Structure formats: C-alpha cells, structure tokens
C-alpha cells in the first residue's frame, strides 16, 4: 500500500517538474520575443560574464518616397545597453549614462560624430533614388543600418497647345505651326517631343508623324514645330496631338490640340514689270501686272501705289504714271482674287534725270555773221 502511494507521488512530482520546465521554456521564449520587439533594428553586443554590452541602431526616412527637389527627414536612433541579459542583446531606453557611440551617415549627411543615446534628425533632398547607411561604433561593437529614399518621377505634360498658319503671301504651300508649353512637377526639362497630324481624328493614317525628336528646353518653356512643304493639302481640316519626354526619358500621354483648316487654295503671287526699263523724270512709264492667282480663282481688283508718282495711285490692271523727281522709287501692287485673298508685292528702281537738249546751228549762218562784222568794221574805218 505504501509502495503504491510513493510511486504515485513520484510520478506526480515528475509531472509537476515537467510542467514547470515547459512553463519556463515558454516564458523565456516570450521574454525573448518581447525584448527583441522593442527596437526596429537588431542589436549587437559582447559577452561580459553573464551580461551583454549592446549597441542598438536604426535609421528611418520620412517620407520614404518623394518627388525630385523635395526633402525627406532621416532619423538616427541610438540606444546603448551596458547591462543587457546574457541571453538577449536588447535596448533599455535612452539614457545618457549608458555610454556613447561614434556614428556617421554616408552620402555627405553626417561625418563621424560622438552621440549619447537618443534620436537625431537630418533633412536630405536627393536628386535620385538614394540609399543612406548609418554606422555606429559603441560599447557593444559596430552596427550598421540602411534606408532607401525613392524619388518619384512624375510624368511631364504639354499644356497651352496652339496652332497657327503663316502669312500665305510669303508661303506658297500649306503650313501649320504647332506650339506647346512643357511642364514637369519635378522641375525636369524637356528632352524630346513627337507630333502627329492627321485628317482623321482617330489618327489612323497620319500625314505627319515626326517620331521622337530630341529637343531640350527648360521646364515651363515653349516648344514648337512647323510642317515641311508638301505634307499638308489645301482646303483640308486636320487634327493634331503632341507627346513630350522629360530629362529622365519619361513620356507624357498624347495630348490633342485644336483642329485647324487650311485655306481653299494658295494666295495670289504678285509680280509686275514696267517700260521703259530706265525711265527719266516726267517720262510716262507703263506698268504691267504679271501676278498669278490659284485654285480656279480670277483677279478681281488691283491697287498700284507709286512713290512720287503722278498719279500716286491707280486701280486699273496695267497702270501708267510719271515720276516728278529722280533717284530710287518704290512701286507696290496689291491684287485681290475672287476668293477674297489678297497680297501685296513691291519693287524699287531708279528714275534718272533727262538728257540735256541741244539745237544744231548750220555753218552758213555764222559765216554770214562773220563777214557782216568785217564789212561793218571797214565801212566805219573808211568814213573816218
């Protein structure tokens, strides 16, 4: 009976001991988890008897992603622990009595500097995505930690799109001149552009597609492009769009500009001639219209303007005038066609002085006067 009781008590004690060991192991594990959860970075340390000398370090960035030109704050956390439990190197809270560490942050942020426990802030403005590494040598050895700040490159955008056409009295083919303002939230410059022009709004068969054209302009500046001869037709409505790239080679989306329509045909081409080619003052000069109109149009009106001419103006096709003074004179002709398109052209030429007039005297007249003078001389002498 006593033996059975002793055996039961012995088995009960083993069970209690076993349960106690399990509780101790679980408790130690939980304590270790709690200790390690106290810091955002692992600590390092050196065994000194049954204690550790630990140096705990972390570096963070807020915000971790920024646009180019913006700033972020790096925060350095340092916590020395000269009396950590032997089984775990852990922080024990900021305390100036825990010792010091010599810390640095690369990329020119912080040279080697001695710090007490604490947190320290540094403002940075990286131009590109950058990784910053902090290094601290403290009572528990040397510890490093890193953080990366990511630069967000916002896409550029073309704004204030406009299209214009030239003075068609100076250009004989259909032309369009496109312009846009390059904008970039990051302050990047433009590196390239692409223009498409089509008579279909869906750009299914572009008459003009420049492809990616290198073109550097500063942020918030205007870019432009003019179509080449023969690319556009008269009397046609066109649609256009532009895409731009920033200095990091990030492109915008396609942005459409206002549509435009070319004239029904070319404007008059002005030309004229005159006769005689080297007129003199007060000599009648004939001016002959040699202008050309296009697209089946006819000439409707003329306006001549003569510098120092008499008359000074004329509205007939082939006019005449005289010039009252010599030297260079300017003559202009404006022609309007049946489409109400009109252009003016001008030319300059010299007006000379007239040649001097002279009269031919027959020889017999002066001989008669000569002999008459001799006779009169001797007649007077004889009377004396």
Image: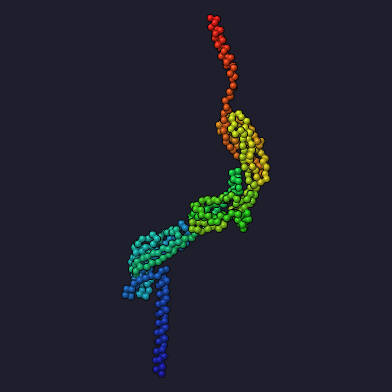
Q: Residue furthest bottom?
A: 1
Kindly identify the residue that appears in the image at 65 percent across and 36 percent down: 318
Q: How many marks do you count on the picture?
A: 0
x, y (%) of residue 355? 57, 27
Kindly identify the residue that appears in the image at 42 percent across and 83 percent down: 19
Quadrant of residue 29 in the image? bottom left
x, y (%) of residue 166? 59, 46
x, y (%) of residue 67? 48, 59
x, y (%) of residue 30? 42, 76
Q: Residue furthest left?
A: 49
Residue 173 visible in image: yes
* Along the viewing direction, whichever of 185 and 36 lies nearer the viewer: 185
* Along the viewing direction, whichever of 136 and 181 lies nearer the viewer: 181
Kindly identify the residue that appears in the image at 61 percent across and 35 percent down: 274
Identify the image's colour scheme: rainbow, by chain, secondary structure or one colour: rainbow
Taking 273 as reference, is 100 left or right? Answer: left
| Quadrant, the N terminus | bottom left
* Along the viewing direction, whichever of 195 and 281 lies nearer the viewer: 281
Quadrant of residue 27 in the image? bottom left
* Along the viewing direction, whichever of 38 and 267 lies nearer the viewer: 267
| Residue 355 vertical placement versus 139 (above, below) | above
Kindly identify the residue that appears in the image at 41 percent across and 69 percent down: 41
Q: Residue furthest top?
A: 384
Taking 214 as reference, is 340 left or right? Answer: right
| Residue 242 vertical placement versus 343 (above, below) | below
Taking 226 as reference, is 121 left or right? Answer: left
Residue 62 visible in image: no
| Residue 299 vertical placement versus 123 (above, below) | above
């Amino acid at each position: 009976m006593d033996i059975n009781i002793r055996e039961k008590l012995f088995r009960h004690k083993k069970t209690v001991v076993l349960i106690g060991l399990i509780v101790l192991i679980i408790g130690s594990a939980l304590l270790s988890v709690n200790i390690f959860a106290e810091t955002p970075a692992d600590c390092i340390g050196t065994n000194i008897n049954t204690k550790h000398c630990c140096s705990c370090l972390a570096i963070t960035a807020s915000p971790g992603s920024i646009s180019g030109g913006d700033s972020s704050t790096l925060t350095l956390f340092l916590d020395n622990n000269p009396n950590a439990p032997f089984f775990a190197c852990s922080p024990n809270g900021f305390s100036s009595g825990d010792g010091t560490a010599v810390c640095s942050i690369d990329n020119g942020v912080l040279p080697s500097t001695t710090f007490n426990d604490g947190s320290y802030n540094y403002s940075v403005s990286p131009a590109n995505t950058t990784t910053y590494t902090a290094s601290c040598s403290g009572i528990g050895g040397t510890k490093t930690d890193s953080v990366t700040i990511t630069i967000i490159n916002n896409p550029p955008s073309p704004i204030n799109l406009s299209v214009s056409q030239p003075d068609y009295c100076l250009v004989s083919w259909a032309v369009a001149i496109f312009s846009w303002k390059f904008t970039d939230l990051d302050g990047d410059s433009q590196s390239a552009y692409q223009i498409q022009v089509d008579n279909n709004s869906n750009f299914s068969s572009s008459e003009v597609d420049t492809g990616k054209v290198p073109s550097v302009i500063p942020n918030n500046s205007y870019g432009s492009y003019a179509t080449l001869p023969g690319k556009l037709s008269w009397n046609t409505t066109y649609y256009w769009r532009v895409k731009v790239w920033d200095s990091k080679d990030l492109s915008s989306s396609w942005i459409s500009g206002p549509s435009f329509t070319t004239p029904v045909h070319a404007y008059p081409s002005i030309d004229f001639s005159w006769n005689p080619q080297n007129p003199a003052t007060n000599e009648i000069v004939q001016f002959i219209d040699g202008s050309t109109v296009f697209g089946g149009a006819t000439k409707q009106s003329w306006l001549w303007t003569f510098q120092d001419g008499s008359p000074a103006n004329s509205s007939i096709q082939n006019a005449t005038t005289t010039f009252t003074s010599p030297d260079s004179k300017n003559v202009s002709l404006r022609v309007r066609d049946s489409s109400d398109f009109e252009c003016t052209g001008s030319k300059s030429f010299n007006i000379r002085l007239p040649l001097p007039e002279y009269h031919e005297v027959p020889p017999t007249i002066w001989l008669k006067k000569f002999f008459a003078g001799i006779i009169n001389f001797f007649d007077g002498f004889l009377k004396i």
